[in-house]
Amino acid sequence: MQLDPALCYEAIKSRDARFDGRFFVGVSTTRIYCRPVCTARTPGRDRCTFFSHAAAAEGSGFRPCLRCRPELAPGVAPVDASRSAAHWTFARIESGALNESDFERLAKEYGLSSRQLRRAVVGEFGVTPIQLAQTRRLLLAKHLLTETRLPMATLAHASGFSSVRRFNALFTSRYGLNPMRFRKTSGEAAGQGVTLRLAYRPPLAWVELRSFLVGRGAVGVECAEGNRYLRTVHLDGRRGWIAVQPAEGRNLLEVEISADLVPVLAKLLPRIRRLFDLDAHPGLIDQTLSQDPRLAPLVAARPGLRVPGALDGFELALRAVLGQQVTVKAATTLFGRFARAYGEPAQTPYAGLLYYAPQAERIARAELQELIDLGLTQRRAQTISDMARAVASGELDLDGGMRIEASLERFQKIPGIGPWTAQYVAMRALRDPDGFPYSDLGVMKAVGLTRPAQVIATAERWRPWRAYASLHLWLGLASGG
């Protein structure tokens, strides 16, 4: 990514939160790198070097600032992330892909040779995929060292390291301190869950985001308690819960994570960021959409509106299929029946969390009549059964493991999956900022058009943020404005 040094320096002088996570500044005299919002005294321009990613700063010999904590910075969410090999690789590495497989396998998933994909990553970020993965693990470890009292072995494995010895060696060589010496005195009690802070670029329309998720989730799987969002989580055989709320007066979400989920933190945290769309650039998105007179008043009413994501792609796809040609209320009722029938019972501290979301493997084993008995037509039951089997067998990936185009192509081969369902899954589960359910009746009504082709033509000016435009139209229609 090309950086304009003059613009970057103006951003750090004003501590402009819009640039948080979009670049980092290394200070030559201290060999420390910071976020643009760091509250330390602004260094002279001649002492500043700007980097597009934390890994590039660390690769040049800079250590992370202990005051602004680069590990808290929002991530990279480029305009064309869904079609860029480098950014797809970055997202997969952020999700822990290189913790479980080698780079050759990752390149094969994308359809390139490892040399081609490596060249794309180095060209975009200035560092190798391995350097990206190492920096990701180290910054997560630093995050946990600072905010928790997890035992070192637990912390190392939760950060993606294969051994404590490897973790200690890399942390000490990169940051100049042994992890035990680095550890803060404050934090959670060992063996308990953890509470971590995740940053975002302001503004954030939290109430709308929380309400959308809860209003379309399964009763007993997710709920709201005051200003908090609660839900159960089933990931890689681990079961637990999360509780999320904004930190008062700060651009942070406080995320409480149950102890049983600590071993899968490296995978869970990126999913939580995607669930709340924390890496979005709301200033850029809102500015683009506000240029259309149709959307301008909607954007002004809900600045910082995010596209709600998904912790599990199959769960979101199931919700989308159940929502075909029925009301939101009816779809939510059906989703609740599936949770009770196929979701395992959960024990949590919260009265509203009773089940884990149904897994593809469980529904794939169900008889077709079982699904019909939940209130489905035979055709829709068959679609869900086919979809569950495809996900359970690994033929279909709805969690971003494949390119968006490849996932959608495979998804739409399932009878009963049309453009509306595919685009809804693209915008929420596959995180395509330009995903656009153009045939949605609500979208057509909101823009006063009757044909999908007309909607597509009108929406050209909303690119590459049509997913955000869709959400503004839905919420505006629901509120009558």
Image (cartoon, helix red, strand yellow):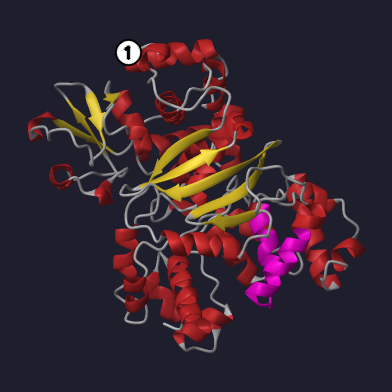
State the residue at coordinates (8%, 33%): 44
The stretch drawn in magenta includes residue 332: yes
State the residue at coordinates (47%, 89%): 448
Element carrying mark 1: loop
Using the rendered view, name the quadrant where residue 409 is placed. bottom right
x and y percentages locating residue 361 in the rendered image: 79, 47
The segment highlighted magenta reads 314-338
x and y percentages locating residue 201 in the rendered image: 33, 51
**Badge 1 local density, few (<14 within 10 Å), some, or many (20+)?**
few
When the figure is inspected, residue 390 is found, relative to residue 257, above or below; the finding is below
The stretch drawn in magenta includes residue 65: no
x and y percentages locating residue 445 in the rendered image: 51, 86
x and y percentages locating residue 390 in the rendered image: 76, 52
When the figure is inspected, residue 48 is found, relative to residue 154, above or below; the finding is below
Disc 1: which residue: 176
The answer to whether residue 377 shows anywhere in this view is: yes
The answer to whether residue 307 shows anywhere in this view is: no
Q: Relative to 410, is 462 on the left or the right?
A: left
Quarter holding the N terminus is top left
Most common secondary structure along the magenta stretch? helix
State the residue at coordinates (36%, 81%): 294
Q: Relative to 191, is 287 on the left or the right?
A: left
Quarter holding the C terminus is bottom left
Front in this rendered view, residue 37 or 349: 349
